[in-house]
Amino acid sequence: MKGIHVTKYGGADVLQYLDLPDPVPEAHQVLIKVKGASVNFADIKARSGKYHLGKKPPYIPGIDVAGIVLDIGQNVKDIKIGDHVIAFPASGSYAEKTVANENLTFVIPESINFESAAACPIVAGTVTHMLNRIAQINDKEIILIHAAGGGVGSTAVQLAKNLGIPKIIGSIGSLWKEKHVKEIGADAVINYADAGYAKQIEHLTDGKGVDVILNPIGGRTIEQDLQSLAPFGRLILYGKLSDENTRIPPGELYTTNKSVIGFSFGHYRRFRPELVNETMTEVINLLAEKRFNIKIGEKFALEQASVAHRHIDERKTIGKVLLIPEIF
Ligand SMILES: NC(=O)c1ccc[n+]([C@@H]2O[C@H](COP(=O)([O-])OP(=O)(O)OC[C@H]3O[C@@H](n4cnc5c(N)ncnc54)[C@H](OP(=O)(O)O)[C@@H]3O)[C@@H](O)[C@H]2O)c1
Protein backbone atom coordinates (compact mmCIF):
# COMPACT_ATOMS: atom_id res chain seq x y z
CA MET A 1 0.00 0.00 0.00
CA LYS A 2 0.95 3.66 -0.22
CA GLY A 3 1.41 5.52 3.03
CA ILE A 4 3.29 8.19 4.93
CA HIS A 5 6.35 7.09 6.86
CA VAL A 6 8.25 8.98 9.56
CA THR A 7 11.79 7.66 10.11
CA LYS A 8 13.05 10.51 12.31
CA TYR A 9 11.56 13.37 14.34
CA GLY A 10 11.60 16.79 12.71
CA GLY A 11 9.72 19.31 10.57
CA ALA A 12 6.99 18.65 8.00
CA ASP A 13 9.50 17.30 5.48
CA VAL A 14 10.10 14.14 7.55
CA LEU A 15 6.72 12.89 6.24
CA GLN A 16 7.65 10.63 3.32
CA TYR A 17 5.11 9.13 0.87
CA LEU A 18 6.26 5.55 0.21
CA ASP A 19 5.29 1.98 -0.71
CA LEU A 20 4.77 0.21 2.63
CA PRO A 21 3.73 -3.32 3.62
CA ASP A 22 -0.01 -3.83 4.23
CA PRO A 23 -0.82 -4.04 7.97
CA VAL A 24 -2.14 -7.45 9.14
CA PRO A 25 -4.95 -7.50 11.73
CA GLU A 26 -4.38 -9.41 14.95
CA ALA A 27 -7.15 -11.61 16.41
CA HIS A 28 -8.95 -8.66 18.08
CA GLN A 29 -8.39 -6.19 15.22
CA VAL A 30 -10.02 -5.14 11.95
CA LEU A 31 -8.30 -4.12 8.70
CA ILE A 32 -9.72 -0.87 7.32
CA LYS A 33 -9.51 0.63 3.82
CA VAL A 34 -8.89 4.30 4.59
CA LYS A 35 -11.39 6.67 2.95
CA GLY A 36 -10.26 9.69 4.96
CA ALA A 37 -7.94 10.56 7.84
CA SER A 38 -7.81 13.80 9.71
CA VAL A 39 -4.71 15.78 10.56
CA ASN A 40 -4.64 16.43 14.30
CA PHE A 41 -2.30 18.63 16.28
CA ALA A 42 -1.16 15.46 18.05
CA ASP A 43 0.33 14.37 14.69
CA ILE A 44 2.37 17.58 14.56
CA LYS A 45 3.59 17.06 18.12
CA ALA A 46 4.31 13.37 17.51
CA ARG A 47 6.35 14.25 14.40
CA SER A 48 8.37 16.67 16.52
CA GLY A 49 8.90 14.05 19.27
CA LYS A 50 6.74 16.02 21.75
CA TYR A 51 3.49 14.02 21.98
CA HIS A 52 3.06 12.26 25.35
CA LEU A 53 1.42 9.26 23.63
CA GLY A 54 3.57 9.45 20.49
CA LYS A 55 5.40 6.54 18.81
CA LYS A 56 9.14 6.27 18.24
CA PRO A 57 10.20 6.37 14.55
CA PRO A 58 9.79 4.57 12.27
CA TYR A 59 6.00 4.86 12.30
CA ILE A 60 2.97 5.76 10.19
CA PRO A 61 1.25 8.89 11.58
CA GLY A 62 -2.46 9.41 12.10
CA ILE A 63 -4.70 8.70 15.08
CA ASP A 64 -8.20 8.63 13.56
CA VAL A 65 -9.81 7.30 10.41
CA ALA A 66 -13.02 6.66 8.47
CA GLY A 67 -13.22 3.75 6.07
CA ILE A 68 -14.53 0.33 5.10
CA VAL A 69 -13.70 -2.94 6.87
CA LEU A 70 -11.68 -5.21 4.54
CA ASP A 71 -10.91 -8.05 6.96
CA ILE A 72 -11.44 -9.06 10.58
CA GLY A 73 -9.39 -11.01 13.14
CA GLN A 74 -10.73 -14.34 14.45
CA ASN A 75 -11.92 -12.91 17.80
CA VAL A 76 -13.81 -9.94 16.33
CA LYS A 77 -17.51 -10.34 17.17
CA ASP A 78 -19.54 -7.26 16.37
CA ILE A 79 -17.94 -5.88 13.19
CA LYS A 80 -18.12 -7.49 9.75
CA ILE A 81 -16.37 -7.12 6.42
CA GLY A 82 -17.93 -4.25 4.43
CA ASP A 83 -19.02 -2.22 7.48
CA HIS A 84 -18.46 1.52 7.29
CA VAL A 85 -16.52 2.55 10.38
CA ILE A 86 -14.67 5.26 12.20
CA ALA A 87 -11.77 4.21 14.41
CA PHE A 88 -8.77 5.15 16.50
CA PRO A 89 -6.28 2.87 14.73
CA ALA A 90 -3.33 1.00 16.15
CA SER A 91 -1.16 1.30 13.04
CA GLY A 92 -1.52 4.90 11.78
CA SER A 93 -4.15 6.33 9.44
CA TYR A 94 -1.95 8.27 6.95
CA ALA A 95 -2.07 5.26 4.63
CA GLU A 96 -4.35 3.38 2.25
CA LYS A 97 -4.99 0.71 4.91
CA THR A 98 -4.82 0.60 8.69
CA VAL A 99 -5.69 -1.78 11.54
CA ALA A 100 -7.68 -0.93 14.68
CA ASN A 101 -8.71 -2.80 17.82
CA GLU A 102 -12.38 -3.79 17.77
CA ASN A 103 -13.06 -1.82 20.99
CA LEU A 104 -11.85 1.40 19.33
CA THR A 105 -13.72 0.83 16.06
CA PHE A 106 -17.30 2.09 15.67
CA VAL A 107 -19.73 1.11 12.92
CA ILE A 108 -21.43 4.10 11.27
CA PRO A 109 -24.56 4.21 9.12
CA GLU A 110 -23.84 4.31 5.37
CA SER A 111 -25.83 7.55 5.20
CA ILE A 112 -22.89 9.39 6.83
CA ASN A 113 -20.43 10.43 4.13
CA PHE A 114 -16.79 9.50 4.66
CA GLU A 115 -15.60 13.08 4.57
CA SER A 116 -17.74 14.13 7.55
CA ALA A 117 -16.93 10.86 9.32
CA ALA A 118 -13.16 11.27 8.80
CA ALA A 119 -13.24 14.79 10.20
CA CYS A 120 -14.84 13.83 13.48
CA PRO A 121 -13.35 11.01 15.61
CA ILE A 122 -10.67 12.89 17.58
CA VAL A 123 -12.16 16.38 17.59
CA ALA A 124 -15.83 15.51 18.11
CA GLY A 125 -14.93 12.73 20.58
CA THR A 126 -12.68 15.07 22.57
CA VAL A 127 -15.21 17.90 22.65
CA THR A 128 -18.26 15.73 23.41
CA HIS A 129 -16.38 14.05 26.23
CA MET A 130 -15.16 17.37 27.66
CA LEU A 131 -18.50 19.19 27.48
CA ASN A 132 -20.80 16.38 28.60
CA ARG A 133 -18.72 14.23 30.94
CA ILE A 134 -15.92 16.44 32.28
CA ALA A 135 -17.45 19.95 32.37
CA GLN A 136 -21.04 18.66 32.63
CA ILE A 137 -22.12 21.94 31.09
CA ASN A 138 -25.79 22.96 31.12
CA ASP A 139 -27.72 25.23 28.79
CA LYS A 140 -27.72 28.18 31.18
CA GLU A 141 -23.95 28.38 31.36
CA ILE A 142 -21.47 30.58 29.47
CA ILE A 143 -18.39 29.10 27.83
CA LEU A 144 -15.00 30.41 26.74
CA ILE A 145 -13.41 28.28 23.99
CA HIS A 146 -9.73 28.98 23.35
CA ALA A 147 -8.05 28.48 19.95
CA ALA A 148 -11.57 28.49 18.49
CA GLY A 149 -10.34 28.63 14.89
CA GLY A 150 -8.67 25.19 15.02
CA GLY A 151 -10.08 21.69 14.67
CA VAL A 152 -11.01 21.06 18.30
CA GLY A 153 -11.90 24.72 18.92
CA SER A 154 -14.23 25.02 15.90
CA THR A 155 -15.90 21.74 16.80
CA ALA A 156 -16.35 22.96 20.38
CA VAL A 157 -18.06 26.15 19.16
CA GLN A 158 -20.37 24.13 16.91
CA LEU A 159 -21.23 21.54 19.57
CA ALA A 160 -21.73 24.18 22.29
CA LYS A 161 -24.18 25.93 19.93
CA ASN A 162 -25.96 22.59 19.44
CA LEU A 163 -26.31 22.20 23.19
CA GLY A 164 -28.06 25.58 23.38
CA ILE A 165 -25.28 27.34 25.32
CA PRO A 166 -26.57 30.94 25.60
CA LYS A 167 -23.21 32.71 25.22
CA ILE A 168 -20.13 31.34 23.47
CA ILE A 169 -16.92 33.34 23.60
CA GLY A 170 -14.19 32.14 21.25
CA SER A 171 -10.51 33.07 21.46
CA ILE A 172 -7.98 33.26 18.66
CA GLY A 173 -4.29 34.10 18.31
CA SER A 174 -4.43 34.70 14.54
CA LEU A 175 -6.78 37.65 14.13
CA TRP A 176 -7.89 36.71 10.57
CA LYS A 177 -9.76 33.70 12.05
CA GLU A 178 -12.36 35.95 13.75
CA LYS A 179 -14.84 35.87 10.84
CA HIS A 180 -14.78 32.06 10.73
CA VAL A 181 -15.25 31.72 14.51
CA LYS A 182 -18.28 34.05 14.43
CA GLU A 183 -19.75 32.30 11.38
CA ILE A 184 -19.78 28.93 13.14
CA GLY A 185 -21.56 30.30 16.21
CA ALA A 186 -19.40 32.35 18.60
CA ASP A 187 -21.18 35.38 20.04
CA ALA A 188 -17.91 37.21 20.72
CA VAL A 189 -14.24 36.69 19.86
CA ILE A 190 -11.22 37.73 21.93
CA ASN A 191 -7.48 37.48 21.36
CA TYR A 192 -5.89 35.03 23.81
CA ALA A 193 -2.50 36.71 23.31
CA ASP A 194 -3.91 39.96 24.71
CA ALA A 195 -2.63 40.31 28.29
CA GLY A 196 -5.87 42.01 29.35
CA TYR A 197 -8.54 39.68 27.99
CA ALA A 198 -9.95 38.93 31.48
CA LYS A 199 -11.29 42.51 31.49
CA GLN A 200 -13.04 41.87 28.18
CA ILE A 201 -14.60 38.69 29.55
CA GLU A 202 -15.81 40.62 32.59
CA HIS A 203 -17.46 43.14 30.29
CA LEU A 204 -18.94 40.46 27.97
CA THR A 205 -20.48 38.58 30.91
CA ASP A 206 -21.77 41.62 32.87
CA GLY A 207 -19.22 40.89 35.59
CA LYS A 208 -20.40 37.29 36.15
CA GLY A 209 -17.52 35.48 34.47
CA VAL A 210 -17.67 32.29 32.42
CA ASP A 211 -18.78 28.92 33.78
CA VAL A 212 -16.68 26.64 31.59
CA ILE A 213 -13.36 27.23 29.82
CA LEU A 214 -11.72 24.85 27.33
CA ASN A 215 -8.02 25.67 27.24
CA PRO A 216 -5.39 23.85 25.09
CA ILE A 217 -2.84 26.68 25.45
CA GLY A 218 -1.72 26.91 29.08
CA GLY A 219 1.02 29.35 30.10
CA ARG A 220 -0.10 32.82 31.02
CA THR A 221 -3.66 32.23 29.74
CA ILE A 222 -4.29 30.20 32.90
CA GLU A 223 -3.86 33.26 35.09
CA GLN A 224 -6.35 35.25 32.99
CA ASP A 225 -8.72 32.28 32.86
CA LEU A 226 -8.82 31.99 36.65
CA GLN A 227 -9.78 35.67 36.80
CA SER A 228 -12.47 35.07 34.15
CA LEU A 229 -13.98 31.99 35.78
CA ALA A 230 -17.27 32.38 37.68
CA PRO A 231 -17.75 30.72 41.09
CA PHE A 232 -18.35 26.97 40.57
CA GLY A 233 -16.66 27.34 37.16
CA ARG A 234 -14.60 24.57 35.51
CA LEU A 235 -11.36 25.29 33.66
CA ILE A 236 -10.40 22.29 31.54
CA LEU A 237 -6.77 22.09 30.46
CA TYR A 238 -6.40 19.73 27.52
CA GLY A 239 -3.22 20.87 25.75
CA LYS A 240 -0.04 22.86 26.05
CA LEU A 241 0.39 24.96 22.92
CA SER A 242 2.41 27.44 24.97
CA ASP A 243 5.80 26.44 26.36
CA GLU A 244 5.39 28.75 29.36
CA ASN A 245 4.89 27.27 32.80
CA THR A 246 2.45 28.66 35.30
CA ARG A 247 1.32 28.33 38.92
CA ILE A 248 -2.22 27.83 40.13
CA PRO A 249 -2.78 29.51 43.53
CA PRO A 250 -5.03 27.25 45.67
CA GLY A 251 -6.79 30.28 47.19
CA GLU A 252 -8.20 31.20 43.79
CA LEU A 253 -9.90 27.81 43.58
CA TYR A 254 -11.22 26.54 46.89
CA THR A 255 -12.62 29.84 48.15
CA THR A 256 -15.18 30.00 45.33
CA ASN A 257 -15.50 26.35 44.31
CA LYS A 258 -13.63 26.72 41.04
CA SER A 259 -12.01 23.63 39.49
CA VAL A 260 -9.09 23.09 37.18
CA ILE A 261 -9.31 19.73 35.41
CA GLY A 262 -6.78 18.05 33.15
CA PHE A 263 -8.14 16.05 30.23
CA SER A 264 -6.61 13.66 27.70
CA PHE A 265 -8.93 11.78 25.35
CA GLY A 266 -5.92 9.62 24.38
CA HIS A 267 -5.50 8.52 27.99
CA TYR A 268 -9.22 7.64 28.08
CA ARG A 269 -8.82 5.61 24.85
CA ARG A 270 -6.00 3.66 26.42
CA PHE A 271 -7.37 3.15 29.93
CA ARG A 272 -11.19 3.73 29.82
CA PRO A 273 -12.25 2.51 26.35
CA GLU A 274 -15.77 1.71 27.61
CA LEU A 275 -16.35 5.43 28.30
CA VAL A 276 -14.96 6.33 24.86
CA ASN A 277 -17.54 3.95 23.40
CA GLU A 278 -20.39 5.90 25.04
CA THR A 279 -19.00 9.20 23.77
CA MET A 280 -18.52 7.93 20.20
CA THR A 281 -22.09 6.60 20.16
CA GLU A 282 -23.27 10.14 20.94
CA VAL A 283 -21.03 11.55 18.18
CA ILE A 284 -22.31 9.05 15.60
CA ASN A 285 -25.93 9.83 16.53
CA LEU A 286 -25.30 13.55 16.03
CA LEU A 287 -23.81 12.89 12.59
CA ALA A 288 -26.50 10.38 11.56
CA GLU A 289 -29.28 12.76 12.55
CA LYS A 290 -27.48 15.53 10.62
CA ARG A 291 -27.50 17.73 13.73
CA PHE A 292 -23.82 18.48 13.28
CA ASN A 293 -21.40 18.95 10.40
CA ILE A 294 -17.79 19.69 11.24
CA LYS A 295 -16.28 22.66 9.48
CA ILE A 296 -13.66 21.25 7.08
CA GLY A 297 -11.07 23.88 6.21
CA GLU A 298 -8.79 22.04 3.78
CA LYS A 299 -8.48 18.66 2.05
CA PHE A 300 -5.26 17.14 0.76
CA ALA A 301 -4.29 13.99 -1.12
CA LEU A 302 -2.36 11.52 1.04
CA GLU A 303 0.94 12.30 -0.71
CA GLN A 304 0.51 15.96 0.30
CA ALA A 305 0.60 15.21 4.04
CA SER A 306 3.73 17.32 4.49
CA VAL A 307 1.96 20.32 2.89
CA ALA A 308 -0.97 19.82 5.27
CA HIS A 309 1.42 19.78 8.24
CA ARG A 310 3.20 22.88 6.99
CA HIS A 311 -0.12 24.75 6.74
CA ILE A 312 -0.86 23.91 10.38
CA ASP A 313 2.67 24.89 11.46
CA GLU A 314 2.18 28.23 9.69
CA ARG A 315 -1.28 28.67 11.30
CA LYS A 316 -2.90 28.96 7.87
CA THR A 317 -5.75 26.53 8.54
CA ILE A 318 -9.21 26.87 10.02
CA GLY A 319 -11.46 24.04 11.18
CA LYS A 320 -10.46 20.49 10.29
CA VAL A 321 -7.77 19.41 7.84
CA LEU A 322 -8.30 16.10 6.01
CA LEU A 323 -6.12 13.63 4.08
CA ILE A 324 -7.84 11.62 1.38
CA PRO A 325 -6.16 8.57 -0.20
CA GLU A 326 -8.62 8.68 -3.13
CA ILE A 327 -11.44 10.94 -4.28
CA PHE A 328 -14.63 10.01 -2.41
N1 LIG B 1 -6.32 16.44 25.45
C1 LIG B 1 -6.89 15.92 24.39
O1 LIG B 1 -7.55 14.88 24.48
C2 LIG B 1 -6.74 16.60 23.07
C3 LIG B 1 -7.40 16.11 21.94
C4 LIG B 1 -7.26 16.80 20.73
C5 LIG B 1 -6.47 17.94 20.68
N2 LIG B 1 -5.83 18.36 21.81
C6 LIG B 1 -5.00 19.57 21.79
O2 LIG B 1 -5.81 20.64 21.38
C7 LIG B 1 -5.03 21.58 20.67
C8 LIG B 1 -5.68 21.88 19.34
O3 LIG B 1 -5.65 20.71 18.53
P1 LIG B 1 -6.27 20.72 17.07
O4 LIG B 1 -6.13 19.35 16.51
O5 LIG B 1 -7.58 21.39 17.11
O6 LIG B 1 -5.23 21.67 16.32
P2 LIG B 1 -5.38 22.63 15.04
O7 LIG B 1 -6.60 22.28 14.27
O8 LIG B 1 -4.08 22.62 14.37
O9 LIG B 1 -5.62 24.04 15.71
C9 LIG B 1 -4.70 24.56 16.61
C10 LIG B 1 -5.05 26.00 16.91
O10 LIG B 1 -4.16 26.36 17.95
C11 LIG B 1 -3.60 27.64 17.75
N3 LIG B 1 -2.14 27.56 17.93
C12 LIG B 1 -1.48 28.02 19.00
N4 LIG B 1 -0.19 27.75 18.93
C13 LIG B 1 0.01 27.10 17.76
C14 LIG B 1 1.15 26.58 17.11
N5 LIG B 1 2.35 26.68 17.66
N6 LIG B 1 1.00 25.98 15.91
C15 LIG B 1 -0.21 25.87 15.36
N7 LIG B 1 -1.36 26.34 15.93
C16 LIG B 1 -1.24 26.95 17.13
C17 LIG B 1 -4.02 28.07 16.37
O11 LIG B 1 -4.90 29.16 16.58
P3 LIG B 1 -4.43 30.66 16.36
O12 LIG B 1 -3.70 30.67 15.04
O13 LIG B 1 -5.70 31.43 16.34
O14 LIG B 1 -3.52 30.96 17.52
C18 LIG B 1 -4.81 26.92 15.75
O15 LIG B 1 -6.04 27.36 15.19
C19 LIG B 1 -3.62 21.00 20.59
O16 LIG B 1 -2.86 21.48 21.66
C20 LIG B 1 -3.85 19.52 20.79
O17 LIG B 1 -2.73 18.87 21.31
C21 LIG B 1 -5.94 17.71 22.98
Image (cartoon, rainbow, N blue to C red):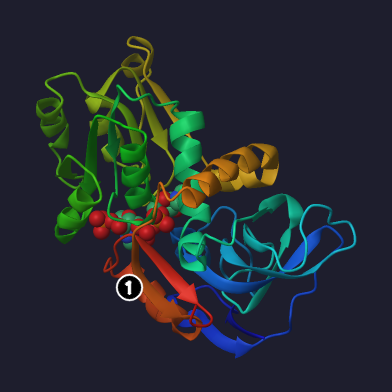
Q: How many marks?
A: 1
The quarter of the picture where residue 210 lies is top left
- Say above or below: 260 vs 65: above
Label 1 sits on residue? 311
The reply to whether residue 32 is in sight is yes
Q: Residue at x 27, y 39 (%)?
A: 221
Rendered location of residue 1, percent (x, y): 67, 86
The response on whether ligand 1 sits within 8 Å of label 1 is no
Rendered location of residue 48, percent (x, y): 48, 67
Say what secondary structure mark 1 lies in: helix
Q: Residue furthest right?
A: 74
The reply to whether residue 246 is in sight is no
User: Of 238 and 25, which appears nearest the observer?
Assistant: 25
Q: Three-letter amino acid code at disc 1? A: His
User: Of 177 and 196, which appears nearest the observer?
Assistant: 177
| Residue density around tag 1, few if under 14, some if 14–19, many if 20 or more, within 10 Å | some
Q: Residue at x 16, y 43 (%)?
A: 190
- Whether residue 25 sits left or right of residue 239 in the image: it is right
Q: Residue at x 79, y 52 (%)?
A: 78
